[in-house]
Amino acid sequence: MILQLLRKYTQLSDEDLVKKYQSSNDAYYAALLFDRYNELTVSLAMSYLKNEADAEDATMECFELIVNDLRKTEVENFGGWYYSVVRNYLLKVKRRRQKLVQEDNIETRLEVDDESWQQLFDSSEEVLTEYLNELLETLKDDQRICIQRFYLDGKSYKEIEQLENIPEKKVKSHIQNGKRKLKIELDKRNVKSINEIS
């Protein structure tokens, strides 16, 4: 009897199984669909993530995603819809992993003598630039302007004094206090690989 039922349902088209799942909310029908596309999912996950354990995790996450999305989505061509959903999800996972790696790189690069600050501000990595801009917004205006002029524009204390009409001693003070404030902000965000700023 069970084998007959299995044969009956496995012979249904993708679209028929979608209808049965949506009308009954029984995950069994979604599992049958997922089983048909499991090999494709694993193959896609491996090609995007290049790691067997991550690919296995992502494959299971894709099943959960499909089960949830399929409840509320009108699907005419299941194969095309499935491929699109899985591909988009894997791209998101890949980007998230890349961002974490880049943020780890930020932490290892925050050895804060003047040379390291300069390397940090010279970076062209998009995620790093975004991170720095967010940090700079936490500073007072004079601190932010002086740090940007010094590290981003490569201006000397004297040039900043002339450009911004801020006494040279104040320029140096704004830069030192700004760096100190950035360190506090980084500590708040649990970026611990930064040394004491002199």
Image (cartoon, rainbow, N blue to C red):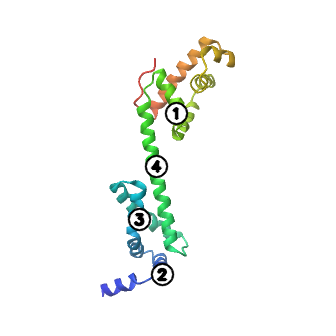
Distance between mark 3 and mark 1 Cα atoms: 36 Å
Which of the two discs, 3 and 1, labels the residue nearer the N terminus? Answer: 3
- Which residue is the site of mark 4? 96
Q: Are marks 3 and 4 in contact (CB under 8 Å)?
A: no
Which of the two discs, 2 and 4, labels the residue nearer the N terminus? Answer: 2
Q: Are marks 3 and 1 in contact (CB under 8 Å)?
A: no
Residue 176: x percent and y percent? Answer: 53, 18
Which of the two discs, 4 and 1, labels the residue nearer the N terminus? Answer: 4
- Which residue is the site of mark 1? 123
- Which quadrant holds residue 137? top right
Mark 3 vs mark 4: in front: 3
Q: Are marks 2 and 4 in contact (CB under 8 Å)?
A: no
Distance between mark 2 and mark 4 Cα atoms: 35 Å
The residue at 58%/19% (across/down) is 174
Tell me if I can see residue 172 in this picture.
yes
Kind of residue at disc 3: Thr
Mark 3 vs mark 2: in front: 3
Q: Residues within 10 Å of mark 4 (few under 14, many from 20)?
A: few
Is 165 situated left or right of 105 in this image? right
Kind of residue at disc 4: Arg
Mark sitting on residue 16: 2
Residue in the foreground of this view, choosing between 142 and 162: 162
Which of the two discs, 1 and 2, labels the residue nearer the N terminus? Answer: 2
Mark sitting on residue 41: 3
Quadrant assignment for the N terminus = bottom left
Distance between mark 3 and mark 2 Cα atoms: 21 Å
Residue 155: x percent and y percent? Answer: 61, 20
Residue 113: x percent and y percent? Answer: 45, 21
